[in-house]
Image: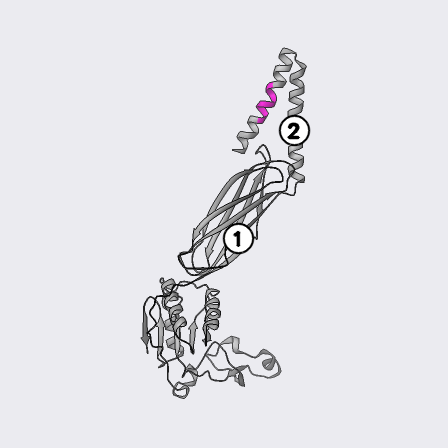
Amino acid sequence: MRVFKVTTFVILLCLPVSAAVYFNVPVLFNIAAALVILLAADIILFMASRGCRAYVMSDKTEYSKKNKGIMTLEVGNRCFYPVSRVKAAVTIKNRFYKGKTNYYVFPLGMFCRKKIRIPFTAVYSGIYDIHIDKLEYTDMFGILKKSLESDVAYSFFVLPNNTGNNDIDILGAIDTDSIPSDNVYSANSGDISSFREYREGDRLNSINWKLTARMENIYVREYEKTSMDEAVILLDMYINTLDNALDELWTIMNGKTNFYVFWLPAGAEEFENRYVSDKATAEYVLTDIYNSAPDMIRDRGLNEYKRLYKGHEFLYVSSKTESVQ
């Protein structure tokens, strides 16, 4: 396309020059000279311009699932000439799922701004990021082009739906002492109680390197046992029906308090857990979960929890909510 435009401009430049020579008309020489000056000015201004700048945002920072919203893309031309073509690639992505990229193409006058209002529907709950991936613009003749990689982003929060199923009993009620010590493990959380020598099977991130450097052997940190006589909900993030599971969890957190929520973040070998004591902590828990975008490995969270906490009954939240021993 650019070759075609350059060829067309060269032909338009050669026509008046040829006609001026053939018919001996000085005015045509002046027209050809004016075209050359205009082209040179276009190239100089394009190379020396400050370019275009883009912003993107939505009309709110928090939505409920299935709600409609408005995304606004604003592009400003800071050049000393009209831009014949602006192309903006805008991606809107839920951190749990694949994003969708839309392209917007339009002309823009000198020192002008253009706002494009784009409607969208928040299909899934979670944190959404709107990002301008690339911004391209051309000179006034559309011959030259610049591409700008952009780091402009905007995020908003979408709450899950309340399914109305608030009569679920949260499970737990088992004494910590009845769980073998090698199974009492909660993301290395809790206070450090002591240090001991490294044994096969210990996690590498529990090694105390400062103490190890002073001693002949490797030492690891021991934590106080996390009490598992509390009620526990396990959210399995490694399922295809994650959005439905989040709806179930949000419904429970809106109707009940005083329980732990366990989940396994993306790429992690250790569970994260938070205690839900009221509505405010429930929202904090939900935010932490949304920031743990998972790799989709089916039932990984369930299998890992059952391995670490043998014999502890808990409420398993996935596509259906069920009791698991």
Give yes or no for residue 187 being in the magenta stretch: no
Give the label on residue 265, or none: none
**309 shown above or below 149:** below
* Neighbour tally class for label 2: few under 14, some 14-19, many 20 plus, Cα within 10 Å: few
Viewer-closest of 100 and 3: 100
Which of 283 and 7 lies nearest the eye of the viewer? 283
Query: Is residue 14 highlighted in magenta?
Result: yes
Q: Are marks 1 and 2 in contact (CB under 8 Å)?
A: no
Per the rendered image, the range of residues in magenta is 9-15
Residue 209 location in percent, x, y? 58, 78
Residue type beneath disc 2: Leu
Which SS does the magenta portion mostly show?
Answer: helix
Query: Element type at marker 2?
Result: helix
Residue 82 percent across, percent down from the top left: 60, 36
- Residue annotated with mark 1: 57
Q: Position of residue 44 (x, y in %)?
A: 67, 35
